[in-house]
Amino acid sequence: MVTQTPFMAMVQAVIFDLDGTLVDSLADIAASTNACLVRAGLATHDDDAIRSFVGHGIGALVDQALGERGTPARVQSMLSAIRAHYHDHCIDRTRPYPGIEAVLDALHRGGTQLAVVSNKPHGMTQRIVDALLPDVAFGFVTGERPAVPRKPDPTGLLLACAALQAPPSRALYVGDTPVDIEAARAAGVRSAAVTWGFRDRHLLEANAPDHLIDTPEQILSLL
């Protein structure tokens, strides 16, 4: 059952997913994916389809975008093409969600440690955070990299807790997909699922997050 009650223990750290949680990146992800499909002479996908592909990392996005057309050689070619295109266009239209920057500022001013753990490749994660949230004092930022497997593996969350010197029991992970909920559960971190991101409310409810929130400001009520 989804709860709406505050923590019994004080939250020391709030860790955030990136895409669909801190920033609305769908337009740039869709544009890069479709541009590379067009170059390969393949059919494109609408935004709703690409929204459903996001959350498990770029490899899963490519697999779903190609579908039955995804031979091993074509998958590798498309991975390289999308990475290169998206690297150059990942902040064209991507922006923080309304209210996010004010909430991050309030958390920091209140003494809460902040981090980002994403399934996006690490370099792209860092670039977007640096470009769009330059004034936020994140104590730890990671995307997928050799030492950090994709969520739902809990490694990224546990590394964030260690970097912020916060035990998992006193951390909150804010994300927008069932993958985020599962990763938080595996790490022993409380989860807050947001309804403004890339997954529908009913799907989030079915995965039983500790909290379900409709606005960034509600994060503050969980502390």
Image: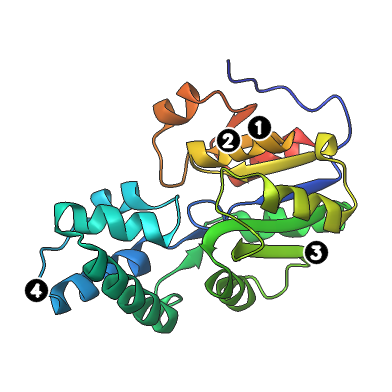
Earlier residue among tags 4 and 3: 4
Q: Secondary structure at mark 2?
A: helix
Give the residue type at disc 4. Answer: Gly
Q: Position of residue 206 (x, y in %)?
A: 46, 22
Mark 2 vs 1: CB contact within 8 A: yes
Q: Secondary structure at mark 3?
A: loop
User: In this image, 153 relative to 24: left or right?
Assistant: right
Gap between marks 3 and 1, in whole Å? 22 Å
What residue is disc 4 on? Answer: 41
In which quarter of the view is residue 221 placed? top right
Q: Position of residue 142 (x, y in %)?
A: 66, 64
What residue is disc 1 on? Answer: 185
Earlier residue among tags 3 and 1: 3
Gap between marks 4 and 2, in whole Å? 37 Å
Gap between marks 3 and 2, in whole Å? 22 Å
Earlier residue among tags 3 and 2: 3
Q: Secondary structure at mark 1?
A: helix
Label 3: how many Cα within 10 Å (few below 14, some 14–19, many 20+): some
In which quarter of the view is residue 126 placed? bottom right
Mark 3 vs 1: CB contact within 8 A: no
Give the residue type at disc 1. Answer: Arg
